[in-house]
Image: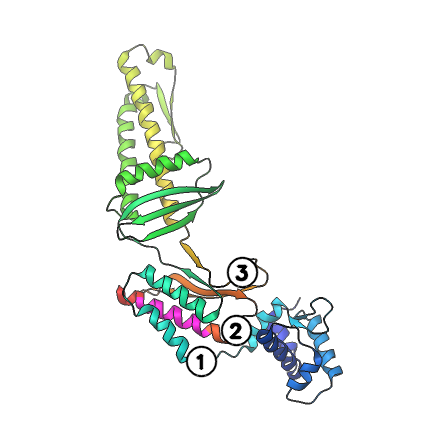
Amino acid sequence: MHDGPEIMDDMNARSREVFRCVVESYLETGTPVGSRTLTRAMTEKVSAATIRNVMQDLEFMGLLGSPHVSAGRIPTELGLRMFVDGLLEVSDLTTDDRQKIDATVGVEGDISQMMDRVGSALSGITAGASLVLTPKHEAPIKHIEFVTLGPDRALVVLVFADGHVENRVFTPPAGQTPSSLREAANFLNALAEGRTISQLQGIVAQEIKSRRQELDTLAHALVESGAALWENEGLPYERLIVRGRSNLLDQDTEAADLERIKTLFDDLERKRDIAEFLDLADQGEGVRIFIGSENKLFSLSGSSLVVSPYMNADRKVIGAVGVIGPTRLNYGRIVPVVDYTAQLIGKMIADRG
């Protein structure tokens, strides 16, 4: 199979013109294009038979296809890719489109409200679905909740003190249950009020450290006497193995120590699980999708996505905006709209600091 640039190099001027006419006509009308239509659209006068031969060549190259028994052709996904990469003429942003996008950022409100307005504006302008990946919110947390979505997917719902709500999807550690997720949330909510996620991570790490030191102090005498030993010491899956346990239980003090060690150990394991939850939730995907069209958008074939990342003041990519729609999108108009929107959001976020 050819790759893109080679295919374009193999095409002569006539093939390119036929190809361009088929794609542009399809993007405009959504219907297959026949050779008769093309004879009228071509700049040079050629016969329908000649055009049919060229279309057959383009079909052989994988750029055009024939739906059902139609005599006309439509571009394949490869053909659209070639067109967008090599032949697309991007129009300038219209004043009307620019004003609609500018209006989304000229209003008071937080970043998430601005993103909602951007999503609505993009849907309205392009008659597609807008995709808005928002930057993560780093504000004090009011409440945390974990929700199981499936065997290997969970959702963390973060409610921030400023009213912002964010959902992030993450993959929990293996073997976790809905009840262990609830327990983690209860523990974190007891500490969360007024703290950011990174502050919470610091507190949980401190808890783990102090539990580990307590354990060490208690177990020290047992380890010294050879009655117990650490396995995988210091690792998340460490264990304290007690030898000849019955001998140790003769004295009440040692029995009490062992019980205390066991309790501390269970506590340490839970805290380590919670720390892992919190880290995974912090890395989770904060994706929000705004649907602005009734197309069956998310069956992968038959859909296109025009997307552009946006950056903060340090030129770090912190999110993205885009448009999803049928492959028949008006690419020439949508590309500058998405590009302009991404630049504008980046500027606004940088200005707000």
Residue stretch rendered in magenta on the structure: 336-348
Q: Amino acid at mark 2?
A: Asn
Residue 269 visible in the snapshot = yes
- Disc assigned to residue 92: 1
Which label was assigned to residue 297?
A: 3
Q: Earlier in the sequence, mark 3 or mark 1?
A: 1
Please state which of the two labelled residues, at mark 3 or mark 1, is closer to the viewer.
3
**Which residue is pictured at 68% across the width and 73% down the height?**
73
Magenta stretch: dominant SS? helix
Q: Which mark is residue 143?
A: none
In the image, farthest residue toward the front: 294
Residue 340 located within the stretch drawn in magenta:
yes
Tell me the amino acid under the disc marked 1.
Answer: Asp
Above or below 91: residue 121: above
Mark 2 Cα-neighbour bin, 10 Å: few <14, some 14–19, many ≥20: some
Which residue does the image show at 35% across and 18% down from the upper left?
A: 227
Marks 3 and 2, how far apart at CA: 16 Å
Residues at marks 2 and 1, CA–CA distance in whole angstroms: 13 Å
Residue at 35 percent of width and 67 percent of height: 345
Q: x and y percent of residue 3 in the render?
A: 62, 68
Magenta-colored stretch includes residue 27: no
Query: Label 2 belongs to which residue?
Result: 330
Residue 117 position by quadrant: bottom left
| Residue 294: percent from left, percent from top | 52, 62
| Residue occupying image coordinates x 31% and y 53% | 164
